[in-house]
Amino acid sequence: MTQAQAWPEQSGTSTIVSLSDMTATTPSPTGPLHELVLHSLDEDQAQDVVSIPLEGKSSIADHMVIASGRSTRQVAAIATHLAERLKQQGHGTPRIEGLPAADWVLIDAGDVVVHLFRPEVRSFYNLERMWGFGDEGAVATGRA
């Protein structure tokens, strides 16, 4: 499997982060935590992965990553695997909310906040649009 890396492209006032088949020697300007999150989501086949840069917009984190799982079971598995990988790579134990129901799971990893949804729940809350990315279609960091 190809190693997933993030590489930003400028699109107006926002930055679109997309996964590509880049060489492992290319440095990532987004940081190792963000790269680990995107790689973990890709490994667990998360769908419609969106990364929203928050630097300069909010003090809660540098990036917000939004992704979907096909079922509550997959959402829970993606969240659990991500938490395990973050801890194994020395990023500490992230705070997780919503895991028992697994309709919407929030993972606070410090500089990166991850929202995992079932598709129906994601379309209802539409976080991308709330952060100004809904009309631009700034997605495509993972599987569709």
Image (spheres, rainbow, N blue to C red):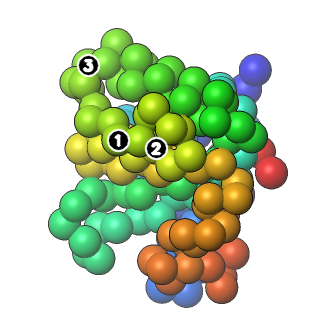
- The residue drawn where x is 48% and y is 79% is 130
Drawn side of residue 86 relative to residue 60, left or right? right
Drawn side of residue 142 relative to residue 15, left or right? right
Query: Residue 38 placed where, x, y %?
Result: 54, 40
- Name the residue tied to disc 1: 97
Query: Is residue 24 in view from this perspective?
Result: no
- The residue drawn where x is 70% and y is 59% is 120
- Name the residue tied to disc 3: 90
Establish if 99 lies above or below 118.
above
Q: Secondary structure at mark 2?
A: strand
- Name the residue tied to disc 2: 105
- The residue drawn where x is 51% and y is 49% is 104
Circle 3 or circle 1, nearest the eye: 1
Establish if 133 lies above or below 71.
below
Quadrant for the N terminus in the image? top right
Whichever of callouts 2 and 3 sits on the residue coming sooner in the sequence is 3
Q: Secondary structure at mark 3?
A: loop
Q: Mark 2 and 1 residues: CB-CB less than 8 Å, in contact? A: yes
* Label placed on residue 106: none
Q: Which amino acid type is marked by label 2? A: Val
Query: Is residue 111 in view from this perspective?
Result: yes
Q: Which amino acid type is marked by label 3? A: Gly
Q: Which amino acid type is marked by label 1? A: Glu
Quadrant position of residue 99: top left
Whichever of callouts 3 and 1 sits on the residue coming sooner in the sequence is 3
Query: Residue 46 placed where, x, y %?
Result: 67, 39
Q: CA distance from mark 2 to mark 3?
A: 22 Å
Query: Residue 129 placed where, x, y %?
Result: 55, 79
Q: Secondary structure at mark 1?
A: strand
